[in-house]
Image (cartoon, helix red, strand yellow):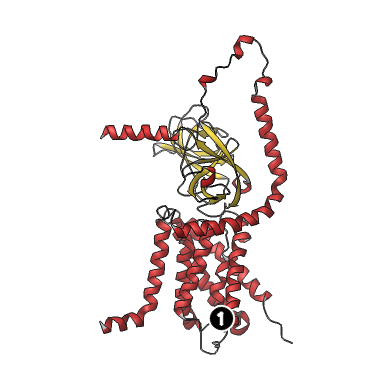
Amino acid sequence: MRYLIYFLQKQYIYFLFLALEVISVLLLFNNNDYQNSAVTYVSKGVAGSVLNLSNNVSEYFSLRRVNRILAEDNAKLHSNRSEAFYKADTESFYHNDTLYKLEYRYISAKVINNSTNKRNNFLMLNKGHRQGLENHMGVIMGDRIVGQVVSVSDHFCWVMSLLNKDSRISGKFKKNNQLVNIEWGGGNYQVGAVKEIPKHVVIHKGDTVITSGNSDIFPEGLLIGTIENFTITQEENFNYATIRFSTDFNSLSFVEVLIDILRKEKTDLKNSFKNSEQ
Amino acid sequence: MTIIFLKNIGRFVFLILFQVLILNNIQFSGYINPYFYIYFILLLPFETPRWLLLLSAFLLGISLDAFTNTLGLNAAACVLMAFVRPFVITAISTGTEFMIGHSPSLKNQGVKWFAYYSIILVLVHHFALFYLEIFRFTEFFQTLLRVLLSSFFTLIIVFIAEYLTYPTKK
Protein backbone atom coordinates (compact mmCIF):
# COMPACT_ATOMS: atom_id res chain seq x y z
CA MET A 1 0.00 0.00 0.00
CA ARG A 2 2.78 2.36 0.97
CA TYR A 3 4.54 1.63 -2.28
CA LEU A 4 1.35 2.29 -4.18
CA ILE A 5 0.98 5.71 -2.54
CA TYR A 6 4.64 6.41 -3.16
CA PHE A 7 4.21 5.39 -6.77
CA LEU A 8 1.14 7.59 -7.16
CA GLN A 9 2.95 10.53 -5.58
CA LYS A 10 5.88 10.16 -7.88
CA GLN A 11 3.87 9.74 -11.04
CA TYR A 12 0.88 11.89 -10.15
CA ILE A 13 1.46 14.24 -13.06
CA TYR A 14 0.86 11.45 -15.56
CA PHE A 15 -2.35 10.46 -13.83
CA LEU A 16 -3.53 14.04 -13.74
CA PHE A 17 -2.75 14.37 -17.44
CA LEU A 18 -4.63 11.16 -18.28
CA ALA A 19 -7.57 12.13 -16.07
CA LEU A 20 -7.95 15.54 -17.72
CA GLU A 21 -7.65 14.07 -21.20
CA VAL A 22 -10.24 11.40 -20.42
CA ILE A 23 -12.63 14.04 -19.05
CA SER A 24 -12.18 16.17 -22.18
CA VAL A 25 -12.67 13.31 -24.60
CA LEU A 26 -15.71 12.03 -22.70
CA LEU A 27 -17.23 15.50 -22.81
CA LEU A 28 -16.47 15.75 -26.50
CA PHE A 29 -17.99 12.46 -27.59
CA ASN A 30 -20.92 12.34 -25.17
CA ASN A 31 -21.87 15.91 -25.81
CA ASN A 32 -25.50 14.99 -26.33
CA ASP A 33 -25.89 13.11 -23.04
CA TYR A 34 -24.58 16.02 -21.04
CA GLN A 35 -26.61 18.60 -22.88
CA ASN A 36 -28.67 19.53 -19.86
CA SER A 37 -26.12 18.98 -17.12
CA ALA A 38 -25.36 21.79 -14.72
CA VAL A 39 -21.95 22.54 -16.25
CA THR A 40 -23.25 23.12 -19.75
CA TYR A 41 -26.17 25.06 -18.35
CA VAL A 42 -23.94 27.58 -16.61
CA SER A 43 -21.44 27.77 -19.45
CA LYS A 44 -24.22 28.39 -21.95
CA GLY A 45 -25.60 31.20 -19.83
CA VAL A 46 -22.25 32.96 -19.47
CA ALA A 47 -21.18 32.42 -23.07
CA GLY A 48 -24.62 33.50 -24.24
CA SER A 49 -24.58 36.80 -22.42
CA VAL A 50 -21.05 37.68 -23.56
CA LEU A 51 -21.84 36.84 -27.18
CA ASN A 52 -25.12 38.69 -26.92
CA LEU A 53 -23.29 41.78 -25.72
CA SER A 54 -20.84 41.73 -28.61
CA ASN A 55 -23.64 41.13 -31.08
CA ASN A 56 -25.50 44.19 -29.80
CA VAL A 57 -22.64 46.20 -31.25
CA SER A 58 -21.97 44.27 -34.42
CA GLU A 59 -25.60 44.00 -35.53
CA TYR A 60 -25.56 47.65 -36.59
CA PHE A 61 -23.11 46.83 -39.34
CA SER A 62 -25.53 44.47 -41.04
CA LEU A 63 -28.64 46.65 -40.83
CA ARG A 64 -28.53 47.69 -44.48
CA ARG A 65 -28.46 44.11 -45.70
CA VAL A 66 -31.12 42.99 -43.23
CA ASN A 67 -33.37 45.78 -44.47
CA ARG A 68 -32.97 44.69 -48.07
CA ILE A 69 -33.83 41.08 -47.21
CA LEU A 70 -36.89 42.23 -45.27
CA ALA A 71 -38.07 44.35 -48.17
CA GLU A 72 -37.69 41.42 -50.54
CA ASP A 73 -39.62 39.15 -48.20
CA ASN A 74 -42.35 41.75 -47.88
CA ALA A 75 -42.69 42.01 -51.63
CA LYS A 76 -42.92 38.23 -51.87
CA LEU A 77 -45.64 38.08 -49.23
CA HIS A 78 -47.57 40.94 -50.80
CA SER A 79 -47.65 39.15 -54.12
CA ASN A 80 -49.27 36.17 -52.37
CA ARG A 81 -52.17 38.13 -50.93
CA SER A 82 -55.54 37.66 -52.54
CA GLU A 83 -55.63 41.34 -53.55
CA ALA A 84 -52.70 40.71 -55.83
CA PHE A 85 -54.67 38.31 -57.98
CA TYR A 86 -56.89 39.32 -60.85
CA LYS A 87 -60.37 38.02 -60.23
CA ALA A 88 -61.40 36.32 -63.43
CA ASP A 89 -64.35 34.58 -61.88
CA THR A 90 -65.90 35.55 -58.57
CA GLU A 91 -66.71 31.94 -57.77
CA SER A 92 -63.10 30.82 -58.04
CA PHE A 93 -62.09 32.73 -54.96
CA TYR A 94 -64.21 30.77 -52.59
CA HIS A 95 -61.81 30.08 -49.76
CA ASN A 96 -62.63 27.13 -47.52
CA ASP A 97 -60.76 27.61 -44.29
CA THR A 98 -61.34 24.12 -42.93
CA LEU A 99 -59.12 22.83 -45.72
CA TYR A 100 -56.13 24.43 -44.06
CA LYS A 101 -54.70 23.62 -40.71
CA LEU A 102 -51.73 25.44 -39.32
CA GLU A 103 -48.73 23.12 -39.42
CA TYR A 104 -45.73 25.35 -38.80
CA ARG A 105 -45.21 28.32 -36.55
CA TYR A 106 -42.22 30.60 -37.14
CA ILE A 107 -40.22 32.27 -34.41
CA SER A 108 -37.81 34.98 -35.42
CA ALA A 109 -34.44 34.81 -33.70
CA LYS A 110 -31.23 36.78 -33.79
CA VAL A 111 -27.93 35.06 -34.57
CA ILE A 112 -25.53 36.08 -31.82
CA ASN A 113 -22.65 33.82 -32.74
CA ASN A 114 -21.80 32.17 -36.00
CA SER A 115 -18.85 30.51 -37.65
CA THR A 116 -18.13 29.20 -41.12
CA ASN A 117 -14.41 28.54 -40.88
CA LYS A 118 -14.40 25.35 -38.81
CA ARG A 119 -15.07 21.82 -39.91
CA ASN A 120 -18.07 21.69 -37.55
CA ASN A 121 -19.93 24.95 -37.40
CA PHE A 122 -22.61 26.06 -34.96
CA LEU A 123 -24.76 29.16 -34.56
CA MET A 124 -26.06 30.55 -31.31
CA LEU A 125 -29.53 32.13 -31.30
CA ASN A 126 -31.07 34.38 -28.67
CA LYS A 127 -34.18 32.25 -28.16
CA GLY A 128 -34.55 29.19 -25.91
CA HIS A 129 -36.89 27.09 -23.78
CA ARG A 130 -38.81 30.17 -22.68
CA GLN A 131 -39.87 30.79 -26.28
CA GLY A 132 -40.84 27.17 -26.81
CA LEU A 133 -37.76 25.94 -28.61
CA GLU A 134 -36.73 22.31 -28.47
CA ASN A 135 -34.07 20.08 -29.99
CA HIS A 136 -34.38 18.99 -33.63
CA MET A 137 -36.33 22.03 -34.74
CA GLY A 138 -35.45 23.34 -38.17
CA VAL A 139 -33.91 26.77 -38.67
CA ILE A 140 -34.44 28.70 -41.90
CA MET A 141 -33.90 32.14 -43.34
CA GLY A 142 -36.75 33.17 -45.57
CA ASP A 143 -37.14 30.19 -47.90
CA ARG A 144 -33.59 28.91 -47.44
CA ILE A 145 -32.42 26.32 -44.94
CA VAL A 146 -29.86 27.03 -42.25
CA GLY A 147 -29.70 24.06 -39.87
CA GLN A 148 -31.30 22.42 -36.88
CA VAL A 149 -31.43 23.14 -33.15
CA VAL A 150 -29.15 20.79 -31.22
CA SER A 151 -29.12 22.14 -27.70
CA VAL A 152 -31.34 24.55 -25.80
CA SER A 153 -31.01 26.49 -22.55
CA ASP A 154 -33.47 28.92 -21.00
CA HIS A 155 -32.66 31.90 -23.20
CA PHE A 156 -30.31 30.60 -25.87
CA CYS A 157 -29.90 27.70 -28.22
CA TRP A 158 -27.13 26.22 -30.36
CA VAL A 159 -27.92 25.40 -33.95
CA MET A 160 -25.92 22.90 -35.97
CA SER A 161 -25.59 24.59 -39.32
CA LEU A 162 -25.53 22.78 -42.62
CA LEU A 163 -21.76 23.34 -42.47
CA ASN A 164 -21.11 20.43 -40.12
CA LYS A 165 -19.80 16.93 -40.63
CA ASP A 166 -22.83 15.45 -38.83
CA SER A 167 -25.31 17.33 -40.96
CA ARG A 168 -27.10 15.42 -43.73
CA ILE A 169 -29.98 17.02 -45.53
CA SER A 170 -32.48 15.04 -47.52
CA GLY A 171 -33.15 16.97 -50.71
CA LYS A 172 -34.56 16.48 -54.15
CA PHE A 173 -34.26 17.91 -57.64
CA LYS A 174 -36.98 20.45 -58.21
CA LYS A 175 -37.49 19.41 -61.82
CA ASN A 176 -38.14 15.71 -61.32
CA ASN A 177 -38.38 15.06 -57.57
CA GLN A 178 -35.40 12.68 -57.53
CA LEU A 179 -34.16 12.25 -53.95
CA VAL A 180 -30.53 13.03 -53.07
CA ASN A 181 -28.47 13.66 -49.93
CA ILE A 182 -26.60 16.88 -49.35
CA GLU A 183 -23.50 17.14 -47.16
CA TRP A 184 -20.70 19.58 -46.57
CA GLY A 185 -17.12 18.41 -47.00
CA GLY A 186 -15.30 21.29 -45.34
CA GLY A 187 -13.33 24.09 -46.94
CA ASN A 188 -15.37 26.59 -48.90
CA TYR A 189 -18.54 27.45 -46.99
CA GLN A 190 -20.49 28.21 -50.15
CA VAL A 191 -20.14 24.82 -51.77
CA GLY A 192 -21.45 21.43 -50.65
CA ALA A 193 -21.59 17.90 -52.03
CA VAL A 194 -24.58 16.07 -53.45
CA LYS A 195 -24.22 12.34 -52.87
CA GLU A 196 -25.90 9.34 -54.45
CA ILE A 197 -27.58 10.76 -57.50
CA PRO A 198 -29.13 7.82 -59.38
CA LYS A 199 -27.55 7.10 -62.79
CA HIS A 200 -30.68 7.74 -64.80
CA VAL A 201 -31.12 11.32 -63.56
CA VAL A 202 -29.86 13.79 -66.16
CA ILE A 203 -28.02 16.57 -64.33
CA HIS A 204 -27.52 20.06 -65.67
CA LYS A 205 -25.57 22.93 -64.25
CA GLY A 206 -27.92 25.28 -62.43
CA ASP A 207 -30.50 22.66 -61.45
CA THR A 208 -32.29 23.68 -58.27
CA VAL A 209 -32.21 21.37 -55.27
CA ILE A 210 -34.90 21.77 -52.60
CA THR A 211 -35.72 19.99 -49.35
CA SER A 212 -37.65 16.76 -49.80
CA GLY A 213 -39.83 16.96 -46.71
CA ASN A 214 -38.92 13.37 -45.88
CA SER A 215 -37.14 14.31 -42.69
CA ASP A 216 -39.14 15.60 -39.75
CA ILE A 217 -37.06 18.74 -39.59
CA PHE A 218 -37.80 20.76 -42.71
CA PRO A 219 -41.01 21.04 -44.71
CA GLU A 220 -40.91 20.38 -48.41
CA GLY A 221 -39.72 22.94 -50.91
CA LEU A 222 -37.14 25.03 -49.08
CA LEU A 223 -34.21 26.13 -51.23
CA ILE A 224 -30.91 24.34 -50.63
CA GLY A 225 -28.91 25.45 -53.65
CA THR A 226 -28.09 25.01 -57.29
CA ILE A 227 -25.88 22.43 -58.97
CA GLU A 228 -22.51 23.90 -59.82
CA ASN A 229 -20.53 20.95 -61.16
CA PHE A 230 -21.04 17.25 -61.61
CA THR A 231 -19.06 14.11 -62.34
CA ILE A 232 -20.40 11.14 -64.22
CA THR A 233 -18.72 8.02 -62.83
CA GLN A 234 -18.36 4.84 -64.85
CA GLU A 235 -17.70 2.21 -62.18
CA GLU A 236 -20.10 3.20 -59.46
CA ASN A 237 -23.87 3.18 -59.38
CA PHE A 238 -24.24 6.82 -58.47
CA ASN A 239 -23.12 10.17 -59.83
CA TYR A 240 -21.84 13.02 -57.72
CA ALA A 241 -22.26 16.75 -57.91
CA THR A 242 -21.24 19.89 -56.09
CA ILE A 243 -23.90 22.34 -55.03
CA ARG A 244 -23.71 26.08 -54.42
CA PHE A 245 -25.76 26.87 -51.31
CA SER A 246 -28.44 29.54 -51.65
CA THR A 247 -27.90 30.51 -48.03
CA ASP A 248 -25.01 32.84 -47.35
CA PHE A 249 -23.91 31.30 -44.07
CA ASN A 250 -21.33 33.98 -43.42
CA SER A 251 -23.85 36.81 -43.24
CA LEU A 252 -26.71 35.37 -41.20
CA SER A 253 -28.19 37.89 -38.80
CA PHE A 254 -31.87 37.09 -38.37
CA VAL A 255 -33.29 33.60 -38.87
CA GLU A 256 -36.58 31.83 -38.17
CA VAL A 257 -37.04 28.70 -36.10
CA LEU A 258 -39.73 26.35 -37.34
CA ILE A 259 -42.05 24.96 -34.72
CA ASP A 260 -43.85 21.96 -36.12
CA ILE A 261 -47.25 21.90 -34.43
CA LEU A 262 -48.10 18.44 -35.71
CA ARG A 263 -44.72 17.03 -34.75
CA LYS A 264 -45.99 15.00 -31.78
CA GLU A 265 -48.67 13.42 -33.91
CA LYS A 266 -46.10 12.48 -36.56
CA THR A 267 -43.63 10.91 -34.12
CA ASP A 268 -46.44 9.10 -32.29
CA LEU A 269 -47.63 7.64 -35.54
CA LYS A 270 -44.09 6.59 -36.43
CA ASN A 271 -43.56 4.97 -33.02
CA SER A 272 -46.87 3.12 -33.04
CA PHE A 273 -46.00 1.79 -36.47
CA LYS A 274 -42.62 0.62 -35.22
CA ASN A 275 -44.20 -1.04 -32.18
CA SER A 276 -46.80 -2.86 -34.19
CA GLU A 277 -44.11 -4.23 -36.47
CA GLN A 278 -42.29 -6.00 -33.68
CA MET B 1 4.15 36.45 -6.78
CA THR B 2 0.64 37.87 -6.54
CA ILE B 3 1.42 40.22 -9.40
CA ILE B 4 2.45 37.34 -11.65
CA PHE B 5 -0.73 35.53 -10.66
CA LEU B 6 -3.01 38.48 -11.42
CA LYS B 7 -1.16 39.20 -14.65
CA ASN B 8 -1.80 35.67 -15.88
CA ILE B 9 -5.48 35.77 -14.94
CA GLY B 10 -5.84 39.03 -16.83
CA ARG B 11 -4.08 37.50 -19.83
CA PHE B 12 -6.39 34.48 -19.62
CA VAL B 13 -9.54 36.60 -19.82
CA PHE B 14 -8.16 38.91 -22.49
CA LEU B 15 -7.02 36.06 -24.76
CA ILE B 16 -10.33 34.19 -24.46
CA LEU B 17 -12.29 37.32 -25.36
CA PHE B 18 -9.88 38.19 -28.18
CA GLN B 19 -10.23 34.69 -29.60
CA VAL B 20 -14.03 34.54 -29.31
CA LEU B 21 -14.93 38.08 -30.32
CA ILE B 22 -12.34 38.76 -32.99
CA LEU B 23 -10.35 35.79 -34.30
CA ASN B 24 -13.31 33.38 -34.51
CA ASN B 25 -15.12 35.88 -36.72
CA ILE B 26 -12.33 36.27 -39.23
CA GLN B 27 -12.96 34.51 -42.48
CA PHE B 28 -9.76 33.98 -44.48
CA SER B 29 -10.91 30.89 -46.30
CA GLY B 30 -12.18 27.54 -45.13
CA TYR B 31 -8.66 26.49 -44.22
CA ILE B 32 -7.27 29.14 -41.94
CA ASN B 33 -8.41 29.70 -38.41
CA PRO B 34 -5.70 30.87 -36.04
CA TYR B 35 -5.97 29.88 -32.39
CA PHE B 36 -4.00 32.61 -30.70
CA TYR B 37 -5.47 31.97 -27.23
CA ILE B 38 -2.84 29.28 -26.56
CA TYR B 39 -0.36 32.16 -26.17
CA PHE B 40 -1.45 31.95 -22.52
CA ILE B 41 0.12 28.49 -22.14
CA LEU B 42 3.26 29.59 -24.00
CA LEU B 43 3.77 32.48 -21.59
CA LEU B 44 3.22 30.75 -18.24
CA PRO B 45 6.34 31.21 -16.05
CA PHE B 46 9.08 28.56 -16.15
CA GLU B 47 8.68 27.47 -12.55
CA THR B 48 4.92 26.90 -12.76
CA PRO B 49 4.24 23.53 -11.09
CA ARG B 50 3.22 20.92 -13.62
CA TRP B 51 -0.15 20.22 -12.01
CA LEU B 52 -1.01 23.92 -12.22
CA LEU B 53 0.13 23.97 -15.83
CA LEU B 54 -2.23 21.12 -16.69
CA LEU B 55 -5.16 22.49 -14.72
CA SER B 56 -4.90 26.01 -16.10
CA ALA B 57 -4.62 24.63 -19.63
CA PHE B 58 -7.72 22.56 -19.03
CA LEU B 59 -9.59 25.61 -17.74
CA LEU B 60 -8.45 27.67 -20.71
CA GLY B 61 -9.60 25.07 -23.19
CA ILE B 62 -12.94 24.41 -21.54
CA SER B 63 -13.69 28.15 -21.33
CA LEU B 64 -13.14 28.55 -25.05
CA ASP B 65 -15.22 25.43 -25.70
CA ALA B 66 -18.16 26.99 -23.88
CA PHE B 67 -18.19 29.74 -26.49
CA THR B 68 -18.04 27.48 -29.52
CA ASN B 69 -20.22 24.54 -28.40
CA THR B 70 -17.37 22.05 -28.73
CA LEU B 71 -17.14 20.98 -25.09
CA GLY B 72 -13.89 19.07 -24.52
CA LEU B 73 -12.27 19.71 -27.90
CA ASN B 74 -10.03 22.64 -27.09
CA ALA B 75 -9.57 21.35 -23.54
CA ALA B 76 -8.08 18.08 -24.78
CA ALA B 77 -5.69 19.87 -27.15
CA CYS B 78 -4.60 22.38 -24.50
CA VAL B 79 -3.95 19.74 -21.84
CA LEU B 80 -1.80 17.81 -24.30
CA MET B 81 0.12 20.97 -25.15
CA ALA B 82 0.65 21.81 -21.45
CA PHE B 83 1.80 18.26 -20.80
CA VAL B 84 4.39 18.42 -23.57
CA ARG B 85 5.66 21.89 -22.62
CA PRO B 86 8.19 20.89 -19.89
CA PHE B 87 9.68 18.20 -22.16
CA VAL B 88 10.08 20.70 -24.97
CA ILE B 89 11.75 23.21 -22.67
CA THR B 90 14.28 20.68 -21.34
CA ALA B 91 14.90 19.32 -24.83
CA ILE B 92 15.78 22.63 -26.48
CA SER B 93 17.43 24.44 -23.58
CA THR B 94 21.16 24.35 -23.07
CA GLY B 95 20.86 25.72 -19.55
CA THR B 96 22.03 29.25 -20.18
CA GLU B 97 18.65 30.57 -21.32
CA PHE B 98 16.79 29.38 -18.27
CA MET B 99 15.93 32.10 -15.76
CA ILE B 100 13.98 31.76 -12.52
CA GLY B 101 11.05 34.12 -12.18
CA HIS B 102 10.61 34.71 -15.88
CA SER B 103 8.19 33.71 -18.58
CA PRO B 104 9.47 32.33 -21.86
CA SER B 105 9.92 35.28 -24.17
CA LEU B 106 11.63 36.38 -27.32
CA LYS B 107 13.74 38.88 -25.45
CA ASN B 108 15.10 36.66 -22.70
CA GLN B 109 15.60 33.44 -24.60
CA GLY B 110 16.45 34.72 -28.04
CA VAL B 111 14.72 34.36 -31.40
CA LYS B 112 16.00 30.88 -32.14
CA TRP B 113 14.99 29.37 -28.82
CA PHE B 114 11.57 31.00 -28.84
CA ALA B 115 10.93 29.99 -32.44
CA TYR B 116 11.66 26.30 -31.70
CA TYR B 117 9.60 26.47 -28.55
CA SER B 118 6.51 28.06 -30.07
CA ILE B 119 6.59 26.15 -33.35
CA ILE B 120 6.68 22.77 -31.62
CA LEU B 121 3.95 23.60 -29.10
CA VAL B 122 1.63 25.31 -31.59
CA LEU B 123 1.94 22.36 -33.96
CA VAL B 124 1.18 19.89 -31.15
CA HIS B 125 -1.91 21.84 -30.18
CA HIS B 126 -3.20 22.35 -33.72
CA PHE B 127 -2.62 18.73 -34.71
CA ALA B 128 -4.58 17.49 -31.71
CA LEU B 129 -7.32 20.08 -32.21
CA PHE B 130 -8.02 19.62 -35.90
CA TYR B 131 -7.77 15.82 -35.94
CA LEU B 132 -10.01 15.52 -32.88
CA GLU B 133 -12.50 17.88 -34.51
CA ILE B 134 -12.75 15.87 -37.69
CA PHE B 135 -12.07 12.43 -36.14
CA ARG B 136 -11.94 10.45 -39.33
CA PHE B 137 -9.20 9.65 -41.76
CA THR B 138 -11.05 10.27 -45.00
CA GLU B 139 -10.10 13.94 -45.02
CA PHE B 140 -6.54 13.33 -43.82
CA PHE B 141 -4.63 15.59 -46.22
CA GLN B 142 -7.24 18.30 -46.23
CA THR B 143 -7.00 18.44 -42.45
CA LEU B 144 -3.20 18.40 -42.63
CA LEU B 145 -3.34 21.47 -44.84
CA ARG B 146 -5.61 23.19 -42.33
CA VAL B 147 -3.23 22.30 -39.48
CA LEU B 148 -0.19 23.70 -41.27
CA LEU B 149 -1.84 26.89 -42.55
CA SER B 150 -3.54 27.66 -39.25
CA SER B 151 -0.33 26.98 -37.28
CA PHE B 152 1.52 29.35 -39.57
CA PHE B 153 -0.95 32.15 -38.93
CA THR B 154 -1.10 31.48 -35.19
CA LEU B 155 2.69 31.71 -35.09
CA ILE B 156 2.67 34.98 -37.01
CA ILE B 157 0.29 36.47 -34.44
CA VAL B 158 2.40 35.08 -31.58
CA PHE B 159 5.53 36.74 -32.98
CA ILE B 160 3.72 40.02 -33.61
CA ALA B 161 2.52 39.94 -30.00
CA GLU B 162 6.07 39.23 -28.80
CA TYR B 163 7.48 42.18 -30.71
CA LEU B 164 4.67 44.47 -29.55
CA THR B 165 5.31 43.65 -25.90
CA TYR B 166 9.10 43.82 -26.35
CA PRO B 167 10.21 46.08 -23.50
CA THR B 168 12.35 48.94 -24.75
CA LYS B 169 15.54 49.57 -22.81
CA LYS B 170 16.29 53.04 -21.58
Give the residue type that dot 1 points to.
Trp
The vertical placement of A218 against A2, above or below, is above
- Residue at (60, 48) in percent of width and height: A111
Residue A50 on image: x %, y %: 60, 58
Q: Secondary structure at mark 1?
A: helix
| Residue A165 visible | yes
Q: Quadrant of the N terminus of chain A?
A: bottom left
> Badge 1: few (under 14), some or many (20 or more) residues near its Cα, within 10 Å?
some
Indicate the quadrant where residue A92 lies: top right
Residue A259 on image: x %, y %: 51, 37
Residue B153 on image: x %, y %: 60, 65
Query: Can you identify the residue that label 1 sits on?
Result: B113
Residue at the outermost bottom position? B96
The vertical placement of A35 against A95, above or below, is below
| Residue B70 visible | no
Residue A187 on image: x %, y %: 54, 51
Q: Is residue A58 found left or right of B137 in the rendered image?
A: right
Q: Quadrant of the C terminus of chain A?
A: top left
- Residue at (71, 39) in percent of width and height: A68
- Residue at (71, 50) in percent of width and height: A60
- The front one of B41 and A192 is B41
- The front one of A200 and B32 is B32
